[in-house]
Amino acid sequence: MPDYSVHKAGDLARDERLLVERWLGRPLSNDETIGVNAYRPHAAPSGNEREILWQEIMPQAREIGSRVQDANEKEIDALIDEAFAATRGGRG
């Protein structure tokens, strides 16, 4: 059984659509795509596994960071703070 599901808003049953709109706190447009993922809890990696993951992630992070133009550290910190606040306070 998959841990994800993707649907067009216009294809959702009425009750499904109302539930998603309640979660998002806004109405959906029929042409929007909705994706739902379920993650099983697991222990955080440690030791060697953690180091390997770090080495895999850092090149990706550097590449993404290289695309930023004319952003200063203060602006970046504000964006990070905003993202953390949204993820922590956005769940009902």
Image (cartoon, rainbow, N blue to C red):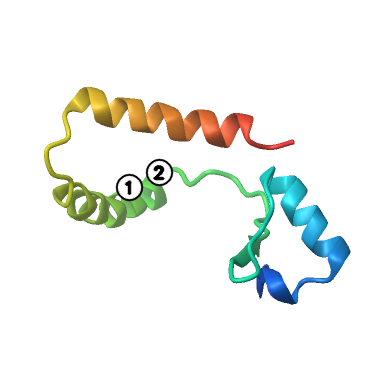
- Choose between 61 and 47: the one closer to the eye: 61
Q: Residue at x 41, y 26 (%)?
A: 81
Establish if 15 lies above or below 73: below
Q: State which quarter of the image contains the N terminus.
A: bottom right
Classify residue 46 as left or right of residue 37: left
Q: Residue at x 36, y 49 (%)?
A: 48
Of all residues, the one furthest to the top in this rendering is: 74
Q: Residue 77, labelled with which disc? A: none
Q: Residue 47, labelled with which disc? A: 2
Q: State which quarter of the image contains the C terminus.
A: top right
Which x, y percent locates residue 43?
59, 45
Q: Are marks 1 and 2 in contact (CB under 8 Å)?
A: yes
Which x, y percent locates residue 41?
66, 49
User: Which amino acid lies under the numbered mark 2 shown in the image of this protein?
Assistant: Gly
- Choose between 8 and 68: the one closer to the eye: 8
Residue highlighted by disc 1: 51
Quadrant of the image occupied by residue 11: bottom right
Q: Residue at x 44, y 30 (%)?
A: 82
User: Which amino acid lies under the numbered mark 1 shown in the image of this protein?
Assistant: Glu
Q: Residue at x 20, y 47 (%)?
A: 65
Establish if 47 lies above or below 29: above
Quadrant of the image occupied by residue 3: bottom right
Query: Pointer 1: residues within 10 angstroms few (<14), some, or many (20+)?
Result: few
